[in-house]
Image (spheres, helix red, strand yellow):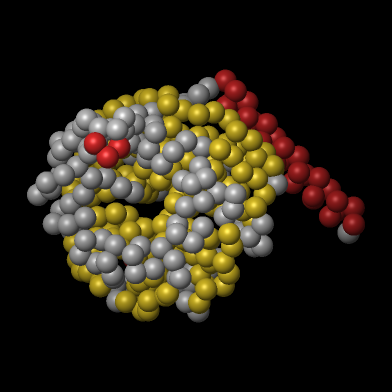
Amino acid sequence: MKLSFGLGRLASGVSFFVLSSFALAIAATSSYHLLHKYPFGAAESSTREYFDYITVDSSARRVYLSHGTEIKVIDADNFSLIGNITGLKQDHGVAIASEFGRGFITDGAQGKVIIFDLKTLKVIGEAKADNDADSVVYDPVSKRVFAMNGDPNSSTVIDAKSGTVVATVKLGGAPEFAVADGRGTVYVNLEDKNEVVAIDSRALTIKSRWPVAPAGRPTALAMDIKRQRLFSAGRNPQLLVVMDADSGKIIQSFPISAGVDAAAYEPETGMIFASTREGMVHVFHEDSPDKFSEVETVKTEFGAKTMGLDTKTHNLFLDTADFGPPATSAAGRPGAAVPGTFRVLVYGR
């Protein structure tokens, strides 16, 4: 028995080493570069150019783009426009509950979660959330949707099957990105408290609170579910930190550029991505559960801070727009996004 256990551990270690070496070999010979650029123009009934979260449903081959007053849905393979979900006021995130054939959109200006049919893209209902409803995630264990309300410092919990509100969880801080670990825990960045909090998705209680120092103002969050590693990226200081999701211990940290707003983890290659307002995607690699390395920094376009990862093709989807002259209060920095210049950028190897 001891011999078998030892051989099992050795085989597992060798497999991880081979996978890591393979991923690093790819990184050494090929860099992420722009594959396609698609302009989409102004959002319906919108007076300004605004865009937020990108959600990639790799299984269904769809990409959901938050675009102010609408959600644009494009094909993940040929990038054509499949449809628009309109009638929104200021949308943010999209969560997919495939087993119920439903999608959920947070509309921060209306304080609602809009429910739509995944096949038809038609709106089929709504649930009351709160002001500044922002990030949203589906937890497959509890079969619940967790909408993060920024200013009210709370999360509205919705039964995915019925679409009814189950409860409101007080978070004690302003939530940003959230991830579900598939084991009954939802992790959330609290930007103003410099913390990650863990929510028990069934009991709807706060299990733990952990500081993200040396990072600060954490926004973007991704997770290696298998190895229980959280990747939390902050804006002040500008760092990506690797955290043990079981203990909250900070394992490693890396400097990144300003204005981070999205992160992603790719299980097949062990790659971690963080996109920033400065037009950079920082790419890291999980060499082992306790050792991470920087792979490359990809130059994109200014404002392309939101990002989605297609785990099938390994492509990255980002979006941005043109920006006007610098505002007087921020000399040297681009001004507001120019209406009608919204576009999607697709990067791959």
User: Between residues 205 and 40, which one lies in front from this camera angle?
Assistant: 205
User: At x 36% / y 79%, what residue is drawn?
Assistant: 166
Q: Image quadrant for the N terminus?
A: bottom right
User: Between residues 128 and 303, which one lies in front from this camera angle?
Assistant: 303
Residue 95: percent from the left, percent from the top?
35, 58
Would residue 145 be visible to someone looking at this image? no
Q: Quadrant of residue 325?
A: top left
- What is the total number of numbered labels drawn onto the structure image? 0
Seen in the picture, residue 339 relative to 123 is either above or below; the reply is above
Q: Is residue 58 left or right of residue 40?
A: right
Q: In this view, does 74 lie to the left or right of 6?
A: left
Residue 178: percent from the left, percent from the top?
45, 58
Q: Is residue 291 left or right of residue 11?
A: left
Would residue 333 be visible to someone looking at this image? yes
User: At x 33% / y 36%, what residue is drawn?
Assistant: 303
Residue 245: percent from the left, percent from the top?
61, 59
User: At x 9% / y 49%, what residue is drawn?
Assistant: 45
As drawn, the residue found furthest toward the right would be 2
Seen in the picture, residue 48 relative to 22 is either above or below; the reply is below
User: Between residues 247 and 87, which one lies in front from this camera angle?
Assistant: 247
As drawn, the residue found furthest toward the left would be 45
User: At x 54% / y 28%, what residue is drawn?
Assistant: 296
